[in-house]
Image (cartoon, rainbow, N blue to C red):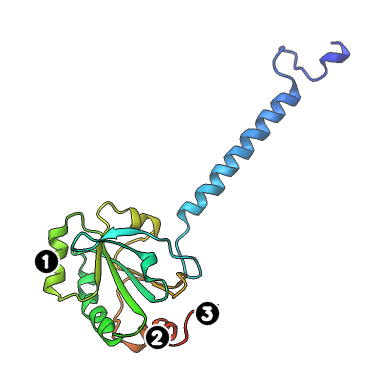
Amino acid sequence: MSGTDKNQGSGGGLPKAAVIGIVAVIVIAVAAIVLSGRRRYEPVAAGTEAMDFTLPDMNGRMVSLKDFRGKVVFLNFWATWCKPCEEEIPSMRSLYEGLEGAPFEIIAVSLDKESAPVAAFAKKYNINFIVLRDADGKVKERYKTTGVPETFIIDQNGMIAEKVWGPRDWSNPSSITTIIDLVKNGPIV
């Protein structure tokens, strides 16, 4: 073998430097894919910014989360077929009525595909807060919910202050400490 053939294998293939370079590029590409995909599966948690969305309300009017900046937002994902959601609704209604006049809003996002069951449910339980419908589940996916009910308490600046998995009795004072603190004292800056 001559001195100019030091980087070539005996089979006349690619020079060793080229092979090492190709392998390095592949390793970097795989690492980038894996690391970027990890974020996809990380849950949306307290301390992160709430993602804006726009969904139709029960009358077909489009409502955006950003419209409620300056208020504490109780963002609840639920469904009419969910028994714990059904049990949670009366205490949500009481919470809403108890904070009437305060900078507070409940936005209940139904994951039902059809609007008729949602309208019947809202009427049956005399729901007096905003009900939106995420029929295609895109907002649910963005918030990476794992089931229903799931609630995000969002501060006046649009930051998630608390995340609650599962149902809660919202008429219990210990369940609403974050909400009351935000309403009274504002967001932690």
Q: Which amino acid does label 2 sit on?
A: Ile
Q: Residue 188 carries which label?
A: 3
Q: Name the residue under label 2.
A: 180
Q: What residue type is labelled 3?
A: Ile
Please tell me which residue lies in front, 34 or 52.
52
Q: In which quarter of the image is the C terminus?
A: bottom right
- Is 166 situated above or below 59? below
Q: Earlier in the sequence, mark 2 or mark 3?
A: 2
Q: Is mark 1 on a helix, strand or loop?
A: helix
- Is 172 situated above or below 64? below
Q: Give the side of residue 73 with respect to residue 86, left or right.
A: right
Q: Which amino acid does label 1 sit on?
A: Ala
Q: How crowded is mark 1: few (under 14 residues within 10 Å), some or many (20 or more)?
A: few
> Residue shown at 51%/70% (left/top)?
47
* CA distance separating discs 2 and 3: 13 Å
x, y percentage for residue 92? 26, 78
Q: Mark 1 points at which residue?
A: 120
x, y percentage for residue 26? 62, 34
Quadrant location of residue 71?
Answer: bottom left
x, y percentage for residue 154? 41, 72
